[in-house]
Amino acid sequence: MPVKHSVAHLLQNRTVHRAVLENGIVILTVENPAADIVAGRIFVQAGGRYESPEQAGLSHLMASVITKGTDRLSSQEIAERVESVGASLGADAASDYCLMSLKTVSADFAEMLELMAEIMRSPSFPTAEVELERRLTLQGIRSMQEQPFSIANSQLRQMMYQNHPYALPSLGTEETASQLTQADLQRYHATYFRPENLVFSIVGRIASEEAIGLVDRFFGDWQPLQLNAPVPPPHLPTLMPYPDRVVTVQETQQAIVMLGYLAVAVNSPDHMALKLLNTYLGNGLSSRLFVELREKRGLAYEVSAFYPTRADVSHFVAYMGTAPENAAIALEGLRHEVDRLRTTPLTDDELQSTKNKLLGQYALGKQTNAQIAQIFGWYETLGLGIDFDERFQQQVADVTVEIAQEVADRYFIEPYVSLVGSEKAAELAAKAAI
Amino acid sequence: MIALLKADFSPFDDFPAHEYRLANGLTLIYQQLPASPAVVVDVWVRAGAIAEPDAWSGMAHFLEHMIFKGTDRLPPGKFDQIIENRGGLTNAATSYDYAHYYINTAASDLPETLPCLADLLVNAAIPDEEFGLEREVVLEEIRQSQDDPDGLGFQALMESVYRQHPYGRPILGDPETLMARSPEEMRCFHRAHYQPENMTVVVVGDVGWESVREEVEKSFSFGSPAVCPRPTIWAEPPMTEIRRQELALPRLEQARLLMAWVAPGVEDMRTAYGLDLLSVLLAGGRTSRLVRELREARQLVQDVGSGFSLQRDSSLFTITAWLEPQHLGQVEAIIGDRLAELAAVAVSETELNRYKRLLCNDYAFSTETAGQVAGLYGYYSTIAQARLSVRYPGVIQSFQPEELRQLACQYLSPLRYAATVLLPSLH
C-alpha cells in the first residue's frame, strides 16, 4: 500500500492521524464513535485566491457543475446514488480553497467515497449543465442586490482589495461569470485537482486505518498528469491602503454602515491580537459594540465586527444596521469604538475575559464531526499544520494589553467607509465627523 | 394535549433522556452526553406569540429581549458577562408556540451559571428605564425584517393562511402596538406565563443527574402567577378556494411564488410526519420531483424548495419557488398537476424508501450536539411531549405508499391553498 508515512498526534485530547500517500495526498483522520456518522472534507488548494480578475467566479461555477456528471454517470444518476442512501455530497468554493464534502451514516461511507473519487477524478462538465448553472449564477449575482448587507459588504471589499482576487464575490460579476465556458472548467480541474494538491479530512465512527485504507483504495492510483508542472501559485498584488468612501443610495428601511481596515494573513504575528480585538469589539452580547451602541443607546439590532482568517491579507470590519436618521451617529459611534482601542489599553480583566471568550467559542465550534474535519483540513491546507489547533491556545495566551494596543494602533489608522441607505441616510453620513 | 395524541405510539421505552416533574410543576429533562465539550441548559416557555391578545402583538418577543435586562440581583448586562467571560454562549429565540433561552457552558461553571439563568427567567425586573431603550432595538429589528423580501413574503403568506388564528400575526409585532404597551403590562404578561407548569428545563451534556436536579430545584422557585389578558383562539376555518395575493416590492431581482397548505398540529402527529415525508419527496433534493422537473429539466426556476413546519395547533406545508415573473403561471400550474398526481397514483417503494432514509439520516445528523438534542426535547415538550421526539424515525419508516396517497389527497389540494406572489415594483 503506497502510504508513505503515517503519524498519530495527540491534540486537545484527540488523536489525529496524519498519513501521506505516495502520490502526495494528505489524509487526516479522527476517530469519534459518539454518533453513527462519518464526515469527510476534501480540500483542494485552489479557490477564489487563485482566480484572475477576468475569470472571477470560476471556482464557484466549477463547484456548481462538478457534481453534475462524470464519464459514466449523469447528474440525476449521481444524485440518485447520494439521495438513496440519505447522504449529503457537495462542492463549494471559498476564498482560499475549494471543498468537496461528504456526510453519511458509517455503513455508507465507503460507497460514497468511491462515488466522490469518480466525481473528482473524471468529471465531464456537461455543456448543458454548465449553461444551466452559469445562468443560475448570473441570477444569483443579481439576487445579491436584494440584500443591503451584501451590497455594503461587496462594495467595501471591492474598494479595499482593488485588483486583488479577494475583491470580488465568490460568484464573480455579471461580466466575468457570463464568459466562463466548459473549457475553462476543464482547465481549472486539470490544474488544481491533482493528488499532491489535496487534503482529506475524515472524522467519525470509522477506524483511522480503515479511513486511510479507503482513500488509498479509491484515490491511491491517481497519478499527477503533468509530473513536472507544479501547481501555479496565485497572482496576489501587494495592497496599498487608500481609505475611501463608497455609498449606494437605496430606499431601504435601514441604513447599513461599515468601517473596514486592511489587516493581515493568518501567519502574521499580529493575527491573534486582531482575533482578540475582534472578539472584544464584536463577539457576543457582552461585546463592546453591542453594549455601547445597542444596549446603552438602542441604535441597532445587529451591530458586530468580523475578521475572517485568511491565507492572504484579511480585513477587519465593524458594522451595524440602523434607522436612516441615525446613519451619522452610527458611523461616529463605530469609529469612536475602534479608535478607542488605539488610545485606551484594555484592562487586564477585559483582556482575560476576551481570551476566555475566544477559546470557549473555539471549543464550541469543534463539536460535530463535520466541524472537526473542517478545522484540521483547513489548517493543513493553509500550511499551518494540524498542531495549529494547539498553537492557537499559546498564541492567545501570549497577547498582552500592550501588544493588543500596539496592533490596534498599527492597523486601525483610517477606515474605508461603506454605506447603503436612503438619500437622507447618505446626506447625514456625508457630514459625519469621522 | 396528551389525551389528544393518537394511540399508535406504543409505550415509551426508548426515550434516552430522564424526564422529571418537580414539586412545583416544572418539567426537567436531562441527558448525559459524555463526550460533549459543554453543558447546554435550554429553558422553553409556552409563551410565544400565540399567548398574546391581538392588542399585545409582539409582547412575547419584546419580553424575550427584556429578560436579559436583569433582576434585582443582576443589573442589565451582568448575566451576559457572567456567561461569556467564562467562555460560554447564551441567546434566545421567540416563535409562535414558544420562547426559549439557552446557555452553553463548561460543566464546572454550571453551579454559577444555571442559578443566574433561572433568576433572569423567574425574577425578570423589566425596569422602566430599559423598556423604552430596548423598544428602539426591537424597532430596528422590525426595520431590518422589512428589508428582507423572503421574510416579508412569508409573513404575507401566514396572514393569508391564518385569518383567525394568531399564527397569522407577525412575531415581532408592529411599531404601533409596541408603542402602546407599558412595562407594567409586560411584567403582568411575564408573571402570568413564566410559571412552572408552562416551562421545561432541558439539560444535556457531561454532567451528573444528581447535581443537575439539585441545582434546578434550588434555582427555579416561582412567585404566584399574575392575571393578564388572554387571546381568544378561534379554530381556523378550512380554506375553500385558492387565496391569492400579490405584493409589489422595490429592489426585487426575481419573483417569488409561495404556496401553503394547512395540516394537523400535534393532535395528529402521524399525519404531520406523513406530510413531512411528502414535502421532501416533492422538493428535498436534486432527484425530488419538483427540483428535477422545474430546476433541472425544464429550467423554469432559479430554485424550488418545500417546507413542513410542525406547530401545536396547525402545521404548515409550504412550497416556494424563485423565478422570472413570466414563468409564474406555468410553474404554479405544474405544481398543481404534480400534487394531483400524488393524490391519484401511489409512489413507488423505491422512491418512498429513498426519502424515508433521507429523513431518518437528517434526524441523526441533526442530533449530534448537546445543543441540538436539548432543542429537540424542549420543542417537543413545549408543543406535545419530549419523548415523542425520538419516535420520529420509527414513524417515518412505517409509512406505506397508499397511506401517503390518501394524505396527499386529503391535505394537498391543488384547488384549496394560499398563494403569495412577490413581484418587482415598476420603477
Image (cartoon, rainbow, N blue to C red):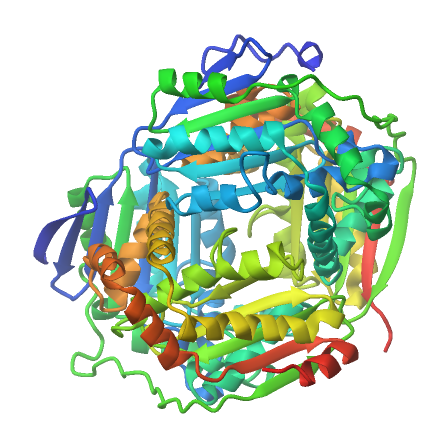
Q: Total label count?
A: 0
Write the residue at 34% across / 63% down: A120
Residue B171: where, in percent of width, then height?
Answer: 74, 43
Residue A369: where, in percent of width, then height?
Answer: 34, 44
Write the residue at 38% across / 78% down: A409
Q: Is residue A27 left or right of residue A320?
A: left
In the image, residue A138 above or below residue A162? above
Write the residue at 45% across / 66% down: A63
In depth, the one of A333 and B98 nearer the eye is A333
Q: Is residue B60 left or right of residue B9?
A: right
Please indicate, yes or no, whether residue B414 appears anywhere in the rendered image.
no
Write the residue at 69% across / 50% down: B134
In depth, the one of A263 and B414 nearer the eye is A263
**Location of residue B66 by image quarter:** top right
Furthest-right residue in this view? B240
Q: Is residue B156 left or right of residue B141?
A: right
In the image, residue B420 above or below residue A106? below
Q: Is residue A403 left or right of residue A136?
A: left
Residue B219: where, in percent of width, then height?
Answer: 50, 22
**Location of residue B273 by image quarter:** top right
Residue A43: where, in percent of width, then height?
Answer: 31, 63
